[in-house]
Image: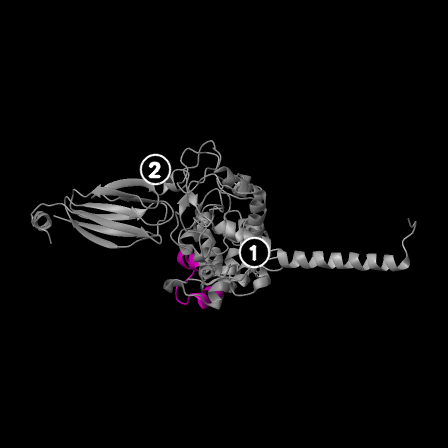
Amino acid sequence: MRPSTMFTAGLLLALQAGHGMATEHVVNQKGKSFIQKQLTVKVGDSVKFVNDDPFAHNVFSLSDTKSFDLGSYGQGLGKSILLDKAGTVEVECAVHPDMRMVIEVQK
Amino acid sequence: MRQNPSPGALHHLALASHLAWLGLLALLLTAAPAAVAAPRASPPDQHWRLPAVPVPRENASTVARVELGKALFFDPRLSGNGTTSCASCHNPSLGWSDGLKKAVGAGGAVLGRATPTILNTAYNTQFMWDGRARSLEDQALGPMKAKDEMNTDFPATLARLRALQGYVSMFNAAYPGEGISEATLAKALAAFERTVTSKDSPFDRWLAGDQGALTVSQWRGFKVFSDPNRGNCSTCHSGPNFTDNGFHNIGIGVQDPPDPGRFNIRKVASMRGAFKTPTLRDIELTAPYFRDGSAASLRDVVDHYARGGDDQSNLSANMKPLTLSEQDKTDLVAFLRALTGKRTKLVAPELPR
């Protein structure tokens, strides 16, 4: 590995290991399902919902912890939501209500 | 120059003529693609085959439960004024619907939405146009409780049932020890509804290997149906029951007042005017179409989608104007007619007196 690459890799590792470093988690939608049914994240993390299906999904939640509506979008697109409060977020697809998952947001 | 052809020349002429016709016929038979039968179903096509009916553990199917549910389904004495049974609107003679644009309720009032068929609802995970019911059991009492539908007086109805020895015996056989209650009433109705299924349509037989079950036109229609760049139908009307159990706004013409549909249940912007995708099995038996009965024929349905819908104010992202030839549209309608299941004889139940 070149010295500059090693430096960059080292820097990235250091950044990841640091306290309070927010992570972006990715949840894919495929076959009218969320690939993960359950996800645990930290306050300040974000979750990006990526649509891998050849039709539109509309991810939303009406939970008190985090209420959001990502709107309807098609294949290949992704939208993020910032989870800024601890608690349980019940996520559903408005178009296909059998699609459900739960996000646990921890302090 | 000869005036009349000789007998020999006439003979040659006739022979040549026959040969020419035979040649033309041979050319037509061999040159025309798929001229005789539709191609065979492929392994990927098999995802259109219906599995066994899903049955909940809390309400397993038994002969006694189905028979009880059937009697109750056809019994108008369950309604407030004794005139209306489930079968009044979900009429087996009209594809388990009522042939009307919108349902007509107690006192003759026209209601807000069309009567859905109950055919194959056993395979659904969402119930009613806006998905407000969670299961067949959950849905069964709804029309009875509705003042403008069956307007059932439950204490009176349950007392009436308990006073009829025929019903006492049937409930005892179906749900021993559970008594005659709203719960067992709902369970019995659901058990019966799970037997109302559409099977062995020409399409099903073609999937099972009967190559001649579909005409070539119907097979072409199936291809149009499944192609996102042509009919784009299977995007929402997906296998095996021709529904994704999802909610979409397909741009039905503006109504006054507008029907919020699924938005009443899930207050998400895209759900305004969105309604549940119904099955297409037995669809030729349930005209008129759409949740307001605004499409009189299957051709009208196809034309609606070909236009990309009418009311564009909150259209589903899956909707778009389609590129369909006249042949495509004819073939598509032909395919939809291939989804009609084998007709089964329904014996009307004897009701306890």
| Amino acid found under the numbered disc labelled 1 | Thr
| Horizontal and vertical percent position of residue B209 | 53, 65
Along the horizontal axis of the image, is B149 left or right of B271? Answer: right
Asked which secondary structure carries label 2, the reply is: helix
Q: Which residues are magenta?
A: B170-187
| Horizontal and vertical percent position of residue B274 | 41, 41
Residue pictured at 40% horizontal, 45% vertical? B247
| Horizontal and vertical percent position of residue B216 | 59, 55
Q: Quadrant of the C terminus of chain B?
A: bottom right
Tell whether position B172 is magenta.
Answer: yes
Q: Which residue is mark 1?
A: B340
Q: Of B68 and B101, which appears nearest the observer?
A: B101
Q: Which residue is mark 2?
A: B269
Tell whether position B17 is magenta.
Answer: no
- Tell me the crowding category of disc 1: few under 14, some 14 to 19, or many 20 or more residues within 10 angstroms, Cα based: many
Residue pictured at 46% horizontal, 37% vertical? B251
